Image (cartoon, rainbow, N blue to C red):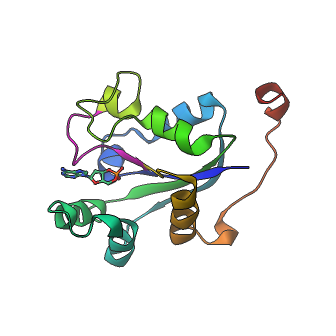
Amino acid sequence: MERTFIAIKPDGVQRKLIGEIIRRFEAKGFTLVGLKMMSVPRELAEKHYEVHQEKPFFPGLVKFITSGPLVAMVWEGDGVVSSARKIIGATNPLTAEPGTIRGDFGVSVGRNLIHGSDAIETAAKEISLWFTPEELVSWDSAMAGWLYE
Ligand SMILES: Nc1ncnc2c1ncn2[C@@H]1O[C@@H]2COP(=O)(O)O[C@H]2[C@H]1O
């Protein structure tokens, strides 16, 4: 079953949106298989965002991600990587559609509340960067027969 990495960034935690964000993924029908609140070490933030290391916003991004607690998650389900990106909305909350998390709650690209893996290969890399295998729980949802044919 497909898995994706989702992080509620420090602004999402400070704005008390943890429950609202988890609710949206649960209500859709995806299954939570990994969850932890953590302070992010600088090396982890730099590794996670290494594709952006030449961008002018990189130092500010690392400073922000390490500035307060973050909630790291792994969600599972058919097509979860691309579906989660749609639930999250466009990178810039000002252009994200209403009904998406960023479209409903954000106003600034540097404070866009949540991260979601952008592709299946990226998801695998990010999951192994943020979680050990022991931290992930494989379980069968009793709802599976009502979610999938
Ligand atoms: N122009 C920008 N200024 C500040 N941060 C940005 C900018 N563009 C992208 N980002 C951040 O870089 C992050 C890269 O992936 P995320 O989906 O976590 O969300 C993005 C934004 O938080």
Quadrant housing residue 98: top left
Q: Is residue 108 shown in magenta?
A: yes
Q: What residue sits 66% from the left and 32% below the top?
A: 29
Q: Residue at x 81, y 34 (%)?
A: 144
The residue depicted at 55 percent of the width and 36 percent of the height is 83
Q: Nearer the viewer, residue 147 or 10?
A: 147
Q: Report if residue 64 lies within the magenta region.
A: no
- Where 127 sits versus 29, above or below? below
Residue 9 versus residue 90: which sits nearer the camera? 90
Highlighted magenta segment, given as a residue range: 106-115
Note whether 138 is above or below 25 in the view shown.
below
Q: Indicate the position of residue 42 as horizontal and vertical percent values.
A: 31, 75
Q: Main secondary structure of the magenta part?
A: loop
Residue 137 shows in the view:
yes
Image location of residue 43, percent across then percent down = 35, 78
Q: Position of residue 131 (x, y in %)?
A: 57, 68
Residue under the point 83% across and 36% down: 142
Quadrant the C terminus occupies: top right
